Image (spheres, grey):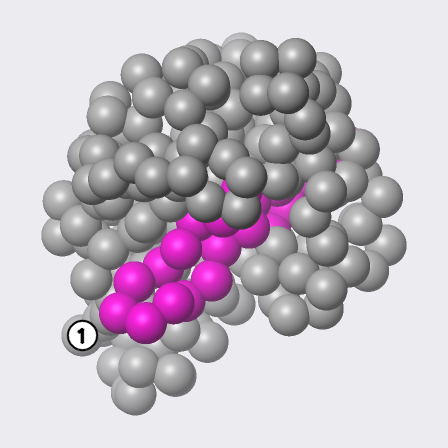
Amino acid sequence: MISQFVIRKARKEDETAVRHCAEHAYAQYVAAIGKKPAPMVADFSSLITLGRVHVAIDAKDRFCGFIVFYEKGDCFFLENVAVHPDMAGKGIGKQLILFCERMAKHADTTSVRLYTNAKMTANLSLYPHLGYRETERRHEDGFDRVFLESPCEKATCGPHTMPGGQDRRYSASSIGGSVTDRRKHAQRDFARQRLTYAKAPFVR
């Protein structure tokens, strides 16, 4: 069965759901890492205020997951992505990452960069399948982190499938205007899209 959900910017009232989602998604790694992973103690209130958090909401207005990303220099930095345990295995995490990649492409940035903890072996297996390559490993802020990158021109930037089979494609040339204008158009238009997803594994 195909389900539908909307990706939109998080609002102040979403903070509790985002925090609970992060706590549930990352709790499994506490024992292996020896302390709470960074996403479990993130300042989501500030991140939401800064407009860096997007959430996935299904047709029944249920919280499905969230992603944190922002522009950093010439790239987009994907800081955090998590799916509610009740919604796991439905491809939501992958669609959230694709959303970030599209936003990065239409903002004319060069790549999407991220890091994951070295103990999160499922992520180290997943991200290469999504087009990310490892760039370095280092100890930072008390964690052993693995850094990965996906160039925008090689990101999985195909069209989302809209309800009824209608495809929507966006390009910098078709949107027009300045980089800032294109970014605003992309943020507004993508936030309105209803995305369909097929069942696919995702572990974060």
Q: Which residue is mark 1?
A: 173
* Residue 155 place in picture, x, y as percent: 21, 43
Of 179 and 34, nearer the camera is 34
Is residue 111 shown in magenta?
Answer: no
Q: Quadrant of residue 87?
A: top right
* Left or right of 23, for residue 112: left
- At label 1, counting other C-alpha atoms closer than 10 Å, the crowd grade (few under 14, some 14-19, many 20 or more) is few
Q: Residue at x 62, y 32 (%)?
A: 37
* Residue 108 place in picture, x, y as percent: 24, 70
Say above or below: 159 vs 3: below
* Residue 18 place in picture, x, y as percent: 74, 41
Of 27 and 17, nearer the camera is 27
Is residue 56 shown in magenta?
Answer: yes
Of 97 and 47, nearer the camera is 47
* Left or right of 112, for residue 67: right
Seen from this angle, which residue lies furthest bottom?
178
Q: Residue at x 22, y 34 (%)?
A: 134
Of 151 and 165, nearer the camera is 151
Number of callouts in the render? Answer: 1
- Could one spot residue 99 in this view of the protein? no
Q: Residue at x 30, y 88 (%)?
A: 178
* Residue 70 place in picture, x, y as percent: 47, 62
* Left or right of 140, for residue 126: left
Q: Secondary structure at mark 1?
A: helix
Say above or below: 180 vs 126: below
Q: Residue at x 14, y 44 (%)?
A: 154
- Could one spot residue 40 in this view of the protein? yes
* Residue span colored magenta: 54-80
Check disc 1 and give the amino acid type: Ser
Magenta span: predominant SS is strand
